[in-house]
Image (spheres, rainbow, N blue to C red):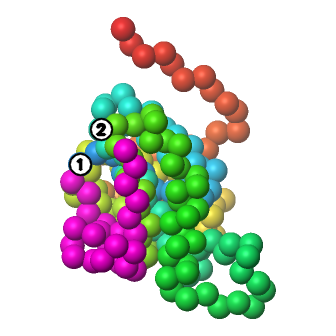
Amino acid sequence: MTEHSSGDEQAGAPQGAVVSHLEVDSGIVVGDDGSGSSQQAVQWAAEEAALRGCDLHVVRAWTMSNAPRPSQWSFGYVPTWPEYEVAVADVLAHNWDGLAERVPALHLHAVHGDPARIIVESSLAADLVVVGSRGHGRVAEFVLGSVADEVVRSARCPVVVVRASTTTTTPLPPAD
């Protein structure tokens, strides 16, 4: 099962509305900013959700400065707010719909706002939060990115930070 949302419909926002927060009731929450580190974090979180038999919430928190710009938008075109939201949700679905076969329940969330704040807020009911070690920000040269740092310091549940790897590894087989 895959559920797509543009935020928190449970709070009364209509489907597709631009919202600024997300509520989850349990499971694993993983942040996706499109970086290699976050992609590895999503893969790790999917494996963990499959092992635990729990829901996986992939969260793409976005702002106007980090939203994708589809190639069909011509140079100088100023998209509307809903067009940005659709672009973010489309990228999220394109990248991660395939995970639905690997986890009990997949929820893809595109939420407008500060990534660290949104992930920390979702940690109130999550069983686990997973983030990549660094993303696309100005602090990418540091060992731990600003979003990961804030999540580690402020989350209300256990946090796993997945370090980007330049080598591939073979997952361990399940324990008997």
Question: Which residue is denoted by mark 2 in the rendering?
Answer: 54
Residue 95 placed where, x, y %?
58, 52
Residue 103 placed where, x, y %?
40, 37
Residue 84 placed where, x, y %?
55, 79
Pointer 2 or 1: first along the chain: 1
- Whether 93 is drawn above or below 68: the answer is above
- Whether 71 is drawn above or below 155: the answer is below
**Residue at the spot 37% in from the left edge and 79% down from the top edge:** 17
Depth check, front residue: 165 or 13: 13
Label number found at residue 68 = none
Dot 2 alpha-carbon crowd within 10 angstroms: few under 14, some 14 to 19, many 20 or more: some
Tag 2–tag 1 contact (CB < 8 Å): yes
Q: Which residues are magenta?
A: 1-25
**Residue at the spot 35% in from the left edge and 69% down from the top edge:** 7
| Left or right of 6, for residue 97 | right
Depth check, front residue: 143 or 34: 34
- Please identify the dominant SS of the magenta region: loop
Q: Which structural element holds mark 2?
A: loop
- Name the quarter where the N terminus is drawn: top left
**Residue at the spot 74% in from the left edge and 72% down from the top edge:** 71
Q: Residue furthest right?
A: 75
Kind of residue at badge 1: Ser
Kind of residue at badge 2: Cys
Question: Which residue is denoted by mark 1 in the rendering?
Answer: 26
State yes or no: residue 90 in magenta.
Answer: no
Q: Which structural element holds mark 1?
A: loop
Residue 104 placed where, x, y %?
34, 37
Dot 1 alpha-carbon crowd within 10 angstroms: few under 14, some 14 to 19, many 20 or more: some
- Whether 151 is drawn above or below 176: the answer is below
Work out whether residue 155 can be spotted: yes
